[in-house]
Amino acid sequence: MIRRWFALAAILVIAIAVVRTASVAAWSATEPQRAQRLWAGHPEVERNLAMAGVGEAARAGRPAGPDTARLLESLAVKEPLAIEPLLVRAVAAESAGDGARAEQLFSIAEARQGRALPPHYFLAELYLRSGRIEDGLREVANLSRLSPGGITGGVQYVAQYARDPANWPHMRAVFRSHPDLVDPILLSLAGDAANTRTILALADARHRGPDARWFRPLLDATIAGGQYGAARSLWATVGGLPNAAGELIHDPTFADARLPPPFNWDLAQTPAGLAERSHGSGLHVIFYGSQGGPLVRQLLLLAPGNYRLALRSAGEISDPQALSWSVRCDKSAIPLATLAMPRPGAFELQFTVPPGCPAQWLQLDGRAEDISGRSDVTIGSIELHGGGPNG
């Protein structure tokens, strides 16, 4: 019996240790303070607390405090091969202008943990900034090789380096030697509209057209930030339309299939219906009537004032309420004006853009019908005229 109780006690101790270790592993990166309360001296806890302290100090523009220094010293004793203390000392040496010492420490960290990404990133940054292009490219290749997603997984490190205009000549050299990095790095930058200047500076002619992978994400990010003028300028620049600034509406004859939305027509191909450009010019719309939804739309940048929209349609419309045009401010569900097309023919819509409405959607919608009927119409062109602020 005593032996059985000893065995149960041993199992309980092991179970507690396993739970404690698992909890520390789970919390140390995301909740280091909580993990510290559970097991204050655990190396993983000290590592993440120290790196959090380093990051906080870096954001504040000051060196790491004494508590962080003590954690790093303790980690160095408990895990002699840990690279975090080396990285912190290397960054401090680089900040102090001692590039040789920084390179030495980064290289030691790389030798200790060859598959860890940070040493490769810091060395790539150091080499590229100092003009050692070949060494820098080697580290870029290491980042790409070691990242879980291959090239895609390592580009965030290089993209961060690319944001500095002083590094653009080096990045162009990287792209010339490693063309497979161009698309992933520019795509990584495209999620932030603040990177527009960087992308345009680094994208060569082959990666600068409307079909470039970075173009639509960057355009969407710029529009999402409310920078409508900058977004349309980017769209026109990349699309090769230097005189597009004076347009009230782009492609009124529906002939330009080259440039993408939203400043060109966005044509639906959904269960609600189909919109397509006719041969040569004109718009062909089929609305099935079973479910509603947008069929055609374009984002406009009209100044406050009065406007007149005119169009002529031909074909068949199954229900007087099936198809209608509307104009509404971006990020608003309430239309400024609507224009129903109860039958084929000529129609005109007058509307006013109020102040505080910098961008507007011009949209053709299909409305679901109680008894489904197919509408099939064509529109040769659409006209939009401004009447000025007072009509």
Image: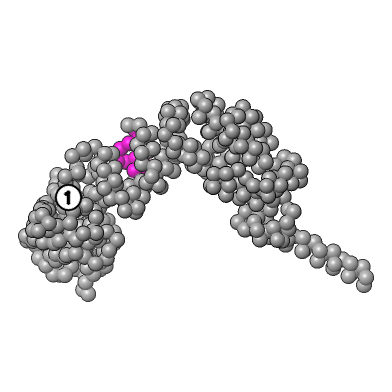
Amino acid type at mark 1? Ile
Residue 60 is situated, as x and y percent measured from the top left of the image, at: 54, 47
User: In the figure, is residue 290 to the left or right of 31?
Assistant: left
Q: In the rendered view, tell whether residue 13 sits above or below residue 220.
A: below
Instruction: Look at the image and tell me in which quarter the N terminus lies.
Output: bottom right
- Taken as a whole, is the magenta stretch helix, strand or loop? loop
Question: Secondary structure under badge 1?
Answer: loop
- Membership of 205 in magenta stretch: no
Question: Can residue 47 be seen in the rendering of this structure?
Answer: no
User: Camera-side residue: 26 or 107?
Assistant: 107
> Residue at image x 21%, y 59%?
355
Q: In the rendered view, tell whether residue 322 sits above or below residue 330.
A: below
- Looking at the image, the residue that sits furthest to the left is 346
> Residue at image x 17%, y 56%?
304
> Which range of residues does the magenta coloring cover?
206-215
Instruction: Look at the image and tell me in which quarter the C terminus lies.
Output: bottom left
> Residue at image x 49%, y 42%?
156
The mark total stands at 1
Q: In the rendered view, tell whether residue 79 sits above or below residue 266.
A: above
Which residue matches tag 1?
249
> Residue at image x 19%, y 44%?
245
